[in-house]
Image: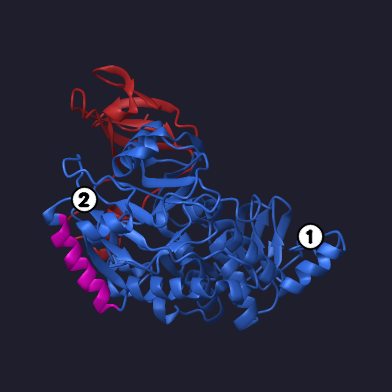
Amino acid sequence: MMRIACPNCGLRDEREYAYGGEAHLDRPELDCDDQAWEEYLFLRANPKGEHAERWVHVHGCGVWFNLIRHTETHEVVAVYVMGVARP
Amino acid sequence: MSRYSAFALLRNWLGGNTDWDPVWRSPEPASSYDVIIIGAGGHGLATAYHLAKHYRPGRIAVIDKGWLGGGNTGRNTTIVRSDYFYKESADFYDHSLRLYASLSQELNFNIMYSARGILNLAHSRHEVDFQRRIVNAMQLNGIDAELLGREEVLKFCPVLNGDPNARFPIYGAMRQKRGGTVRHDAVAWGYARAADALGVDILQNTEVTGFRRDISGGVQGVETSKGFIGATKVGIATAGHSSVVAQMAGFRLPVASYGLQAFVSEPVKPVLHTVIGSAVIGSYCSQSDKGGIVCGGGIDPYPSFAQRGSAATMEKVLAGIVQLVPTFSSLRLLRQWAGIVDYTADSSPIIDRSPVPGIYLNVGWGGGGFKAIPAGGEAFAHLIAKDEPHPLTTAFGLQRFRDGALIDEAAAAGIEH
């Protein structure tokens, strides 16, 4: 069982959380071209390694936050609040 | 290649089974090939077979970092079906199912296709209405889907939980009779043997570490753990690792990789003669010829390249199996495993040219690549040989993500694949 440290609630089992996609995707202006919109909607880094991603503590405090997780070992390298640049 | 037959069986038995031919060679890599396929799974091997048989583009190699059929081809729940909603999917997957039906003869290798039928259960009146709609759509597409009422379901498959007060009572089901199971390893081995006999080099334990490109950007070959191998056409058929290989070539893909788990119980006497599943419960199972109950369900809920799977998902899937068939609660699991599958936003595959000239894509199969192997190999061989999409896969290109022309099967049929 993967365990994640919520910034508010501390270390809890993965089943208390929900994954919310890759972090730090900037939504382009609505009059952008199709390529920029495609990149925003669909193209992803999907690395085998460290991945910056959004999670929500859905069965806890309900807060969204970012973390950096290794997608092969599932080790959580860093947890940081929304709005902060990737460490 | 010596043909397998009753006569060959008898002859080798008389000889003490000591002089069977090796099923495929283990050649050293040549310095260059005309076509290289990365990934010796079902799709890679089927592609090489179709290329060698129908297009003869010259020398062909299939290279894999591990052993052939050691990825998702050997890690799935062996189910084949074509009960898709959209015409593009129905045409393609039904072609694949029809190829499966005659594949043992085509490859001279018993792939043990068993058309035992697939039963998708409905647990409410509203789900029955929904199934009526998608069965109508499937029938218009020429797929042999049909609706069963509650009594018919329980008569056909008495092991199901028929308690009307169950948490998920059975209201009916949709069934595809031609759906069923195929021996998954045999598909990899059969294509490997047939491709090898046509001169294809299968290079196992050879890991691709990068691409070499010329000044104009076109591909010149691949760097591997056994040195550089030249080729001006390279096909990527690496399932969950598609974005890892794409990154080596310098482009991104519209995919995300997840673990998809399967489980098999200890063997028991025949109790389940069909495939049963429930979209609402999110689990499905069948019984293998060895007697094990083979169970599967939804993907793990976060991206992963670890081939082990989440314990939380395991609990959810198996709790669903016990809802479907309460007597299975006394079974013990024998094995559990996870394959890494690459999902697109619309759960439909990508069979297309890549942004790099000379590199071709057969990726994005999600959890549904196994059933598509024969048609996927045929279509990918056509794409590589002719540099244009096979007529059955024109809708499954990369451009659809820019145009918004998605073929959203997951939303349409409510079934993950």
Is B130 one of the magenta-colored residues? yes
Give the x, y percent position of residue B252: 43, 55
Residue at (40, 55) in percent of width and height = B366
Would you say residue B75 is visible in this rendering?
A: yes
Q: Is residue B390 left or right of residue B210?
A: left
Residue at (20, 27) in percent of width and height = A63
The N terminus of chain B sits in image quarter: bottom right
Residue at (26, 72) in percent of width and height = B138
Q: Quadrant of residue A7?
A: top left
Our reading of the magenta stretch's main secondary structure is helix
User: Which region is colored magenta?
Assistant: B127-141
Chain rendered blue: B
Q: Quadrant of residue A25?
A: top left
Task: Write down the residue under mark 1.
Answer: B28
Crowding near pointer 1: few (<14 within 10 Å), some, many (20+)?
Answer: few
Label 2 to label 1: alpha-carbon separation: 56 Å
Return the residue nearer the eye: B331 or B297.
Answer: B331
Q: Is residue B203 left or right of residue A25?
A: right
Task: Write down the residue under mark 2.
Answer: B170
Give the x, y percent position of residue B259: 43, 43
The colour chain A appears in is red
